[in-house]
Amino acid sequence: MRNSLSRHRRRFYAAAMVTHRLAPLTLAACLAALALPGTARAEFAVCNQSFDVVNVAIGQDVNDEFQTEGWWTIGPNQCANVVKTELTSRYIYIYAQDVFGQPILPGTTQMCISPRKFVIRGITECWSRGDISAGFIEVDTLKTQRWTLFLAATP
């Protein structure tokens, strides 16, 4: 039984995709909460449309130096506000892993992460600083001020 579950998990995560399309009805409540008057609006949100909990880290240019930050734990059909200020960089970098620490997005941009909550300035020499190098995906926000990224499993 364990081997078949393990194969199922690999297929699910191998099929994970990233999209920035309009939210389906299952996420309408989450996105409506972002737009309520008097609440802080997320300028970059990540919504999990999969069936499993995911942990997310981000990378972005902060004062002309790359910085990574994590973790946000996002349950199924939930969203997390990962950047709460207006976007100033065109590109945001995302790393996502399952609750077992296995990456679920095949990223190619190497940046630093840590097993515990972190903010790391710089993306080089991760190992020598006691951090881990991980492959982030690049999200082109098209120079918009707000962006929502959806993580979903393909059928």
Image: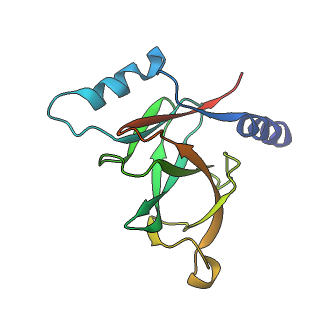
Residue 12 vs residue 19, the one in the foreground: 19
Q: Do we see residue 98 in this rendering?
A: no
Q: Give the image location of residue 88, x and y in percent.
A: 36, 51
Q: How many marks?
A: 0
Compared across the picture, whether 67 is left or right of 114 comes to: left
Left or right? Give the position of 36 relative to 119.
left
Quadrant of the drawing holding the N terminus = top right
> In the rendered image of this protein, does residue 6 appear above or below residue 100?
above
Q: Which residue is at 42% across, 52% downward?
A: 89
Q: Residue furthest bottom?
A: 128
Instruction: Please tell me which residue lies in front, 52 or 89.
Output: 89
| Residue at 67% across, 51% down | 107
Q: Position of residue 100 (x, y in %)?
A: 65, 53
Residue 9: horizontal and vertical position, in percent?
A: 74, 39
At 60% from the left edge and 30% from the top edge, which residue is drawn? 152
Q: Residue furthest left?
A: 38
